[in-house]
Structure formats: C-alpha cells, structure tokens
Amino acid sequence: MGRLSRAAAASFSAGAHDHGICVAEAMRDAERICAGRGARLTKLRYRVLELVWSSHAPIGAYGLLERLSRERRNATPPTVYRALDFLVAQGLVHRIESLNAFVGCVDPASAHAGQFLICRDCGAAAELHDPRVNRAITRGAAEVGFVAEQRTVEVRGLCPACRAGEGAESHAR
C-alpha cells in the first residue's frame, strides 16, 4: 500500500491512527516545499494549515476563522481567505467544492487532481490519487472536444466506522 493509500486508510481509521504524526508530517512537508519554491509560509499561513490538518474532516473558512479568533483577536474573513488561497496555490490544501471546505493534501510535492471519498455521516474525507481516474476524465473529455481544466472528483458514501455503526443499528432492530 503506497503513501496515499495509507493516508486514505488513516482518514477512516477508528483508533489505531496517530493523527499527530499526520499533522507533523504535513507541517514538515509544507515548510520544505515552501522553502524550495521560495514561497513564504508565514506564521498565520502555517497556523491555518495546522487547523486544516487538525482532523480529516473538511473545514470551511468560517470554521477556521472561529478557531483562529480564539487565538488572534484580529482574525478576519479576508485574512483566512488569503491564507487559504496561498495554501491552495502551493498545493498544500484542496478545496472540496461541494462542501465549500478545505482538507490537507496528502501529497503536496506533486501536482495532481483531487479525488475524495467523503463520509456522509461523520464528515471525514480521504484523498485518493489514482492517475487512471485522471486519464479517464481527460480521455472522455477529449472524445467530445472538451478540454478539462480542473478535475475534482467527490464521492459520497460511508466510511468503515460509520458502516459498522449502521450495521450494528440495523442488526439491533
């Protein structure tokens, strides 16, 4: 199982997952990537990225603002949106369009389209990166003369923990 598969599995793990490791790796990757690109990862951008990574569930800009406001009195929506714009531009976070929310990117060093599994019950999201999906979209678009400029695939369903809970509820009836 590759890094992305492990990361996707970690997003939906119940208790065996040490999320602190995810956050620490993401922050180290962000520092390294930004330094290599000459992009400035300010304290505020760093903190917003940490907050995005605080769970595997997508978080909206106003959720980030609420958390940030507890620490910084001068946090405003434009402040958060500018930080998010930077993080998206650097490939450190993805925007999940249907939720108008953001998740940390599990492979920020390589450019790729987002493919997400989103649990409809607990809200956890897992990022996949399967080049075959991207090729299929590109090929299908080209067959009808369409040029795909942005590819985000969002799949809703139930994560293993919620499926287990749902199964237990249905068996209890």
Image: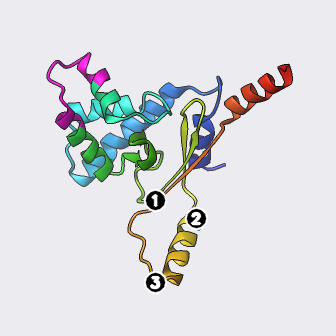
Among numbered discs 2 and 3, the one appearing first in the sequence: 2
Which residue was labeled with disc 1?
113
Q: Nearer the viewer, mark 2 or mark 3?
A: 3
| Nearer to the camera, 14 or 3 | 14
The x and y percentages for residue 28 are 37, 37
Which amino acid lies under the numbered mark 2 shown in the image of this protein?
Answer: Val
Q: Residue at x 44, y 42 (%)?
A: 99
Going from N to C along the chain, the mark reached first, 2 or 1, is 1
Q: Label 2, on which residue?
A: 133
Q: Which residue is mark 3?
A: 145
Q: Does the magenta segment cover residue 78?
A: yes
Q: Nearer the viewer, residue 75 or 9?
A: 75
Residue 88 spot, x, y in % from top left? 32, 49
- Badge 2: residue crowd in 10 Å (few <14, some 14–19, many ≥20): some
| Residue 168: quadrant of the picture | top right
Confirm whether the magenta stretch covers residue 61.
Answer: no
Q: Which residues are magenta?
A: 66-80
* Residue at position x 36%, y 29% in the image: 51
- From the viewer's perspective, tell me whether residue 150 is left or right of residue 161: left
